Amino acid sequence: MRQGLADAVTMTWRNLKAMSRNPQVILFSTFQPVIFVLTFRYVFGGSIRVPGVDYVNFLMPGVFVQSVAFGGMNTAAGLAEDLSKGMIERFRSLPMARSAVLAGRVLADLVRNIGVVLLMVGVGFLVGFRIQGSAGEFVLAMALIVVFAVGMSWVFALIGLVSSNAEAAQAMGFPILAIMVFASTAFVPIEGMPGWLQAYNDFQPVSVTVAAVRGLTLGSATTGQILGALAWAIALAAIFGPFAVRVYRRAR
């Protein structure tokens, strides 16, 4: 176990170094969420009414969750690129834990996701976002986002492993994100959706997580919302993590 953890830390450092030498990835990871904030805050925000809540306070929790969900694309693209360049074969020839390559990628992307969320918090405050709940509730909201980011990274790790290259991984991942994020309650209230879409958003992971994070930042979260978001994050990691490791062992 100790050696496996050491291997995962080594691979995390390797991936972080690779990110630092690829500024385009860092720029996209930070610039794209900022565009979402500005667009929905100043372009669509005037047309969207949420009873009893300023739209910016409704919007920002959705942006936080959306940012880490889209961060999974980097996990998929990074692993697919390593596969296409033969790096996975080189890693598998080394005396290291098989899970370290995947864990290192997930942990490195977790570090990037934390940085993106902190940036979004700062941007949110600049455009009028204010925390209505307590400091403890806000910290719990951030913790839920981090745990959800880990679960989503394992989902996209699997997508990266079954893709032929980084472009294919992005092509496979985007429709999944579109269904989960753009059809969610991240940007608009559920009351304005048709009945079948409301039923979908009562249970899908992005909307469940957004509801919990939004409730915590507004000071109105219920225990059920928090447990539901935590259950989804754990389920995603527990299901897709072992599956991804199994696929990795059989990867070309």
Image (tube, helix red, strand yellow):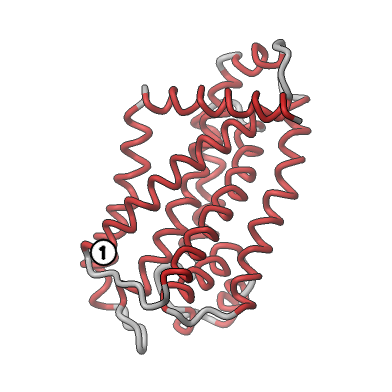
Identify the image quadrant of residue 156: top right
Observer-nearest of 197 and 25 = 25
Under mark 1, the amino acid is Phe
**What's the residue at 77%, 25% (across, down)?**
249
Q: In the rendered view, does 88 fall on the left or right side of 137?
A: right
Residue 94 rendering spot, x and y as whole percentages:
70, 11
Look at the picture and state if 51 lies above or below 240: below
**What's the residue at 71%, 37% (across, down)?**
244
Residue 209 rendering spot, x and y as whole percentages:
55, 66
Q: In the rendered view, does 185 fall on the left or right side of 107?
A: left
Identify the image quadrant of residue 188: bottom left
Q: Which residue is mark 1?
A: 125
Look at the picture and state if 245 lies above or below 89: below
Residue 182 rendering spot, x and y as whole percentages:
46, 62
Look at the picture and state if 229 lies above or below 77: below
Observer-nearest of 46 and 56 = 56
Identify the image quadrant of the N terminus: top right
Classed neighbour count for the residue bearing mark 1: other residues with Cα under 10 Å, few (<14), some (14–19), many (≥20): some
**What's the residue at 68%, 56% (across, down)?**
234
